[in-house]
Image (cartoon, helix red, strand yellow):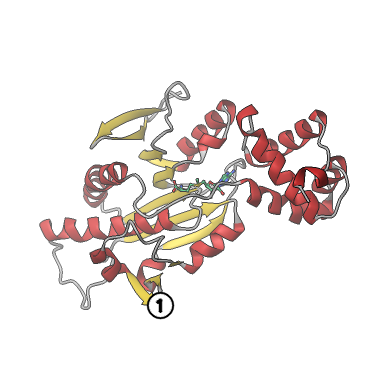
Amino acid sequence: MSTTLTEIPLTDAELKLLQTLVYQECGMYFDERRTHFLRDRLQRRIKVCELDSFYSYYRLLTSREGKKELTALLENLTVNETSFFRIRPQLELFQKVVLEELLKRKQERRDWSIRIWSAGCSTGQEPYTLAILVCDALAYYYLRNPLPFDMPTPKPLIPPPWKVEIIASDINYSALLTAQQGVYTEAQMETVDYTCRLRYFDKVGDKYAVKPALKSLVQFDFHNLKTEYLPQRNDAIFCRNVMIYFDEAEQKRLIEKFHRCLNPDGYLFVGHAESLFGLTTRFHMIHQHNATVYQRIEGAQ
Ligand SMILES: C[S@@+](CC[C@H](N)C(=O)[O-])C[C@H]1O[C@@H](n2cnc3c(N)ncnc32)[C@H](O)[C@@H]1O
């Protein structure tokens, strides 16, 4: 039987209602180019719920009993594509320029904390990559600038008195669960070189599990970027390949929130195909290593 025969008709008015609901809930905007995707996912969910019209589905989503279904719908609408060491030039800029500057500045002030937020972390490859980069950067920094006291043995991943926190958040609970498990297939590990695998992963059967010491640096949490309650006091925020699904108004609101969520002189990384151009005057752009990062401007209106 062809699926078109079993499809429940969706009127333009119903589509608009659902489009608006999704936008209000999570900021994702489905313009004409992406309505076919929205229609397809809605058709799937309405069948799962065994309903016979989109209006009744809308009524379910907006009811008290519909909270679970709304979560399921949003999970079905998010694109969770990600990988370890995604967009290397940006990560090189992070490690060689941003972290180097942060470590120096913080050490001078005797502030031994580093807090990085991966906003829209999907299945965890991004925050674990960031944790690896921070560990390596700290080790290399102290190779060149030895600490004035003996390092404990065995050498900890994070040399004391430093404290590193990687906050990793997403709106998709299933993705967060996978991230928290931290177990990846050979295919998912394709972009992780063997020295990195040896240092930061354990082989479990035919998969790779993130070593507990690295895992302990990353805290996973549910956060909807549409809301105001978001992790504060970050030295850097990575929000890559998320804003691309938002419209301009929502992007502007999110950038304002990121400005508030950053420490003074903090850094914001967006996706390779994303830019803050024309959206804000509160950040200045740094372009090095063939990549871009935005730094918070203090006192900017
Ligand atoms: C394409 S993935 C990007 C993953 C990773 N940042 C990267 O670049 O590899 C986009 C992620 O953003 C999440 N997302 C979309 N809308 C969100 C929202 N309103 N709040 C939090 N996360 C959101 C999705 O669930 C998805 O996991």
Say if 212 sits above or below 33 in the image.
below
Q: What is the crowding at mark 1: few (fewer than 14 residues within 10 Å), some, or many (at least 20)?
A: few
Disc 1, SS: strand
Q: For residue 254, say whether it is visible.
A: yes
Left or right: residue 189 versus residue 219 is left
Q: Quadrant for residue 268, please give it.
A: top left
> What residue is shown at x 42% (from left), y 38% (from top)?
271
Q: Quadrant of residue 136?
A: bottom left
The residue at label 1 has a CB less than 8 Å from ligand 1: no
Q: Is residue 247 left or right of residue 145?
A: right
Q: Which residue in the protein does label 1 denote?
A: 204
Above or below 78: residue 295: above
Q: Nearer the viewer, residue 206 or 24?
A: 206
152 or 37, which lies in front? 37
Residue type (three-letter) at the residue carrying disc 1: Val
In this view, 130 is above or below 270: below
Across and down, in percent, residue 40 comes to: 70, 43
Residue 113 x, y percent position in the rendering: 34, 55
Q: Is residue 159 visible?
A: no
